[in-house]
């Protein structure tokens, strides 16, 4: 990247100072690629009693059937101890379980070892979560869903619900606006630039050149749209769109790719065309498509709640797979543009320090005090914050 060295670029941790470790489930069964399986697992847990319920639950040091915890912010899960709990399953919510893998989660605090309530408090229709990832592949993922990855810091774009109080270094947007010769850029535009320009570290080269900024923001906006998938659905050009050419089997077990035919095979089922760039798309050293398929076909120990799943491959999974292929192919087209993104007239770490933007105040690295409504604590008591 011309005009700026890695050492000059401010760290992502200074530009988006508030970050949270990802929620830690502690047990795999409260999450699944389909919501119906989660409700069936919950019902099986509620029907079991005594030692059977305890074995199914899979207790840890953080969570047992006797653990008393409050309700997750904004959710309807119960707060009585699971030892004597009954009733229907809390309505599963859509989450980002792994890079580009949207799954479902039972939003019950009693099931999750470390739920990170501060993330749940700011998760709404306005929020965008940035999730750090490892090369090869994108260094920063973005999602509108609550992220529940197994690794990578989570950086919400907003510190409060309703898109209030951007999680940006205080004064950063104003300084960029002055350097770019216009008003302060919108928080989503700053995130778009960050997603497009982020480099290993992670560090984010910044520019004071209005033309370069506009190009980077446009590129980042497209990346955000593809990763968030919360608007018009992405499509490949006609003739390049993947379709099911041979019906997928009821229970596929093997995924393979034919590069010459540009075809993805699920046993004897066939999807094509699948661009090589989609098949080769990796995050943190693993192919996205292979990991996505494994999450839906890997076996679980018989008799456990995780073993409860669909009897046959759901049609919804096929639709999700076709869209995932499309997203990965389109993101792969963007990658060369990222590598070519120039950063003339750099805004360096030293400049931000001289302007008083850095160092970031300690308060900006901590969650905001958010309590718009009363939260139910253990055994139905109200939480006092």
Image (tube, rainbow, N blue to C red):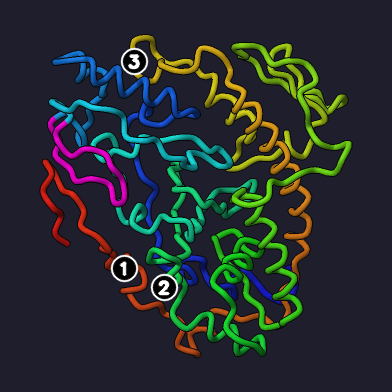
- Residue 184 is left or right of residue 361, and the answer is right
Q: Where are the magenta residues, as a range? A: 66-81
Estimate the spatial distance between the alpha carbons at disc 3 and disc 1, rounded to whole Å: 39 Å
Q: Of 384 and 332, which appears nearest the observer?
A: 384
Q: Residues within 10 Å of mark 3 (few under 14, many from 20)?
A: some
For residue 368, which numbered disc appears in the image? 1
Choose top left, top right, bottom left or bottom right for residue 169.
Answer: bottom left
Local SS, label 3:
loop
> Decide: marks 1, 2 in contact (CB < 8 A)?
yes
Local SS, label 2:
strand
Q: Residue at x 36, y 73 (%)?
A: 364
Choose top left, top right, bottom left or bottom right for residue 88.
Answer: top left
Q: Residue at x 48, y 15 (%)?
A: 299
Is residue 306 found inside the magenta-colored segment of the image?
no
For residue 304, which numbered disc appears in the image? 3
In the rendered view, would you say 116 is above or below 81? below
- Residue 81 is left or right of residue 228, and the answer is left
For residue 161, which numbered disc appears in the image? none
């Amino acid at each position: 990247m011309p005009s700026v060295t890695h050492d000059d670029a401010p760290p992502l941790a200074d530009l988006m100072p508030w970050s949270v470790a990802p929620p830690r489930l502690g047990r795999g069964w409260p999450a699944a690629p389909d919501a119906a399986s989660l409700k069936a697992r919950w019902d099986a847990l509620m029907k079991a009693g005594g030692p059977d319920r305890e074995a199914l639950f899979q207790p840890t040091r953080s969570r047992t059937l006797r653990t008393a915890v409050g309700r997750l912010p904004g959710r309807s899960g119960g707060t009585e101890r699971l030892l004597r709990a009954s009733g229907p399953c809390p309505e599963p919510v859509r989450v980002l379980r792994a890079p580009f893998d949207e799954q479902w989660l039972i939003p019950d605090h009693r099931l999750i070892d470390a739920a990170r309530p501060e993330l749940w408090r700011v998760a709404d229709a306005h929020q965008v979560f940035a999730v750090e990832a490892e090369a090869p592949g994108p260094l920063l993922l973005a999602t509108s869903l609550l992220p529940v990855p197994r690794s990578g810091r989570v950086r919400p774009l907003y510190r409060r619900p309703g898109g209030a109080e951007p999680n940006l270094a205080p004064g950063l947007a104003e300084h960029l606006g002055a350097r770019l010769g216009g008003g302060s850029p919108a928080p989503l535009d700053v995130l778009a630039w960050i997603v497009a320009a982020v480099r290993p570290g992670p560090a984010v080269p910044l520019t004071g050149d209005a033309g370069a900024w506009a190009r980077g923001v446009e590129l980042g906006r497209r990346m955000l749209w593809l990763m968030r998938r919360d608007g018009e659905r992405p499509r490949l050009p006609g003739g390049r769109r993947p379709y099911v050419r041979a019906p997928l089997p009821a229970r596929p077990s093997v995924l393979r790719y034919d590069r010459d035919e540009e075809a993805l095979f699920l046993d004897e089922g066939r999807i094509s065309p699948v661009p090589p760039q989609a098949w080769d798309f990796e995050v943190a050293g693993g192919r996205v498509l292979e990991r996505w398929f494994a999450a839906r076909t890997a076996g679980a120990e018989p008799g456990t709640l995780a073993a409860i799943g669909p009897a046959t491959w759901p049609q919804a999974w096929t639709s999700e797979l076709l869209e995932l292929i499309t997203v990965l192919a389109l993101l792969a087209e963007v990658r060369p543009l990222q590598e070519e993104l120039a950063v003339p007239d750099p805004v360096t770490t030293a400049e931000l320090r001289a302007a008083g933007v850095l160092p970031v105040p300690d308060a900006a690295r901590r969650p905001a005090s958010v309590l718009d409504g009363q939260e139910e604590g253990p055994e139905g008591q109200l939480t006092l914050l």
